[in-house]
Amino acid sequence: MKHIYSILMLISLLFVGTACEDDYRDMVFFTGDAPIYQIGTCDNLIGSVNLYLSKPEGIIVGVDGGDGNYSIVNGEDAIVTAAFVKSESGYQRIQIIPKAEGETGITVRDGSGSSTLLRVKVDECLKLIWSKKKDGIVVTGEATEEQKKNIADAFTDFFTVKVGGRYEMIPDNESEMWEKGTLRVRPDDSAIAPMIGRYERGPVVDGEVERLGLLFKYNDEEHFYTFNGPDLTRMSVMEYMDFWEDVTEVCPVEVPVGCKVYHVERLSPYNQSINN
């Protein structure tokens, strides 16, 4: 009988321990009213955020998990500050305020010593930055290899933006990133001040074909780009994108009849590196 009682006690303790484990979650940061944990759904758990000095109010995020006895350990106070604000929907909230450009982290600890880290990057404003990785000339139509070479050589040092330069697209409306906005152009990788221009999305006519593209205006220049080459191939924006520009009319040397000349810029989202 004593053995049966001991076994029942062990089983009871096991159930109690399991229940305690179920009540304890690892700490997480989340957006929205409440954290979404369901597998197979669009969860709202986050490990990093991007903030902008153009939005000085920052962001409010929620914290869940742990024992609920939270404390904040700020990273670089010169970059961001973080503080608890009023709880909502039963969850503790933290407001993170951007102070200067840079990257840092916000750590939240609970009473047991467990912790979680939120990585924070602060930029000047929302912008899409393209870094120029490669530059090339493509000639379509009936042209000899010698003619193609002569055309390519004629465009040496022809274009303002060199490999290593970049374009910064700052939208007028953040919800319409590609529509129109301010364009900053850095011709190379030097620290000189950028050229300021404009960009806008619109149709680009290539022969009898009309394609959606971008117009870049800067330095008294206009460049009409499409994202498809003559064979309608599209490059993946995840790694890089090829911007195609018809430069037949401005070619410094004679172009064979029936041929077209394209300037192709291979651009990569800034800070991504490619080997292609």
Image (cartoon, helix red, strand yellow):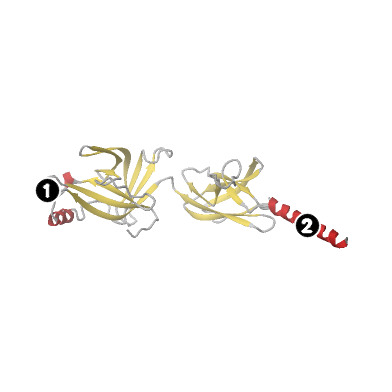
Tell me: 5 left or right of 50.
right
Q: Residue 248 is drawn in which quadrant?
A: top left
- Coordinates of residue 194 in the picture (x, y in percent): 33, 50
Secondary structure beneath dot 2 equals helix
Question: Is the residue marked by circle 1 packed among few (<14), some (14-19), or many (20+) residues within 10 Å?
Answer: some
Number of dots carrying numbers:
2
Could you tell which of marks 2 and 1 lies nearer the N-terminus?
A: 2
Tell me: 239 left or right of 7.
left
- Coordinates of residue 100 in the picture (x, y in percent): 48, 51
Q: Which of label 2 and label 1 is nearer to you?
A: 2
Cα–Cα span, label 2 and label 1: 88 Å
Secondary structure beneath dot 1 equals loop
Residue for point 11% across, 48% down: 256
- Between 65 and 123, the residue placed more toward the observer is 65
- Coordinates of residue 64 in the picture (x, y in percent): 63, 48
- Between 192 and 97, the residue placed more toward the observer is 97
- Residue 67 visible to an observer of this rendering: no
Q: Which amino acid is tagged 1?
A: Pro
Instruction: Write down the residue under mark 2.
Output: 11
Q: Residue furthest right?
A: 1
Tell me: 48 left or right of 62.
left
Instruction: Write down the residue under mark 1.
Output: 256
Residue 18 drawn above or below residue 173? below
